[in-house]
Amino acid sequence: MTTDKLFLSNHDSTPMYEQIMEQITTKVMAGDWRPGQSLPSIRELASASSVSVITVKRAYLELERAGVIVTRQGKGSFVAETQDLAKQLVRDEFDAHLMGMVGAAHKLGMGGNEVVEHVSAAMIATAPASSSSTAANANTSTKLSTNPSSTRTIK
């Protein structure tokens, strides 16, 4: 049984069940909670977190729908043993951010090529030092902009 505490805030505008979901998902993504590891029972977590059983039950149901946890009748809830669960969760988070970026690009009236240029520049700017030669090769083989005044720095 996991004994890691969850930190819930009444002052956060995020509903309690979403705070629970977010923190459990974060622990799974970080590898703190391993596949097959048992979670606190709904009643235990409700008591420890000072929230209602209904709130925790909703969080667990949503986590189960998302494939993060599995519940076995009479046994409890466990971190799902899906292969590469943490990687899939990170990919889902990436996709959510990507959709936000695409929405912002549409609002700015940016075309696909301009978005790709920005993403390429960001990838090069944040490339690990060990792949600096790869970044340099990418930089020389891919011309990001034909107009030097339109080049932007990614911070």
Image: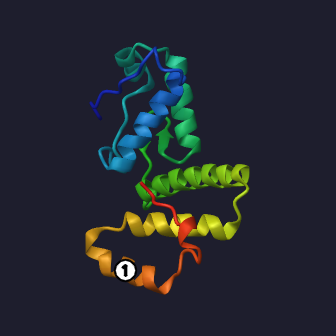
Query: Looking at the rendering, in which quadrant would you find the C terminus?
Result: bottom left
Pinpoint residue 77: horizontal percent, then vertical percent.
44, 37
Residue 75: tell me if it is visible. Answer: no
Residue 107: tell me if it is visible. Answer: yes
Query: Would residue 125 appear left or right of 59 to someone viewing this image?
Result: left
Instruction: Using the image as rendered, state which of residue 69 and residue 100 is in the foreground.
Output: 100
Query: Would residue 118 appear left or right of 108 to someone viewing this image?
Result: left
When the figure is inspected, residue 12 is found, relative to residue 123, above or below; the finding is above
Q: Quadrant of residue 33?
A: top left
Q: Residue at x 44, y 67 (%)?
A: 123
Residue positioned most to the front: 149
When the figure is inspected, residue 66 is found, relative to residue 94, above or below; the finding is above
Query: Would residue 139 appear left or right of 143 to someone viewing this image?
Result: left
Instruction: Using the image as rendered, state which of residue 121 and residue 29 is in the foreground.
Output: 121
Helix, strand or loop status at disc 1? helix
Query: Looking at the rendering, in which quadrant would you find the N terminus?
Result: top left
When the figure is inspected, residue 77 is found, relative to residue 153, above or below; the finding is above
When the figure is inspected, residue 153 is found, relative to residue 24, above or below; the finding is below
Residue ID for mark 1: 136
Dot 1: few (<14), some (14–19), or many (≥20) neighbours within 10 Å? few
Q: Residue at x 37, y 63 (%)?
A: 126
Q: Quadrant of residue 32?
A: top left
Pinpoint residue 116: horizontal percent, then vertical percent.
59, 68
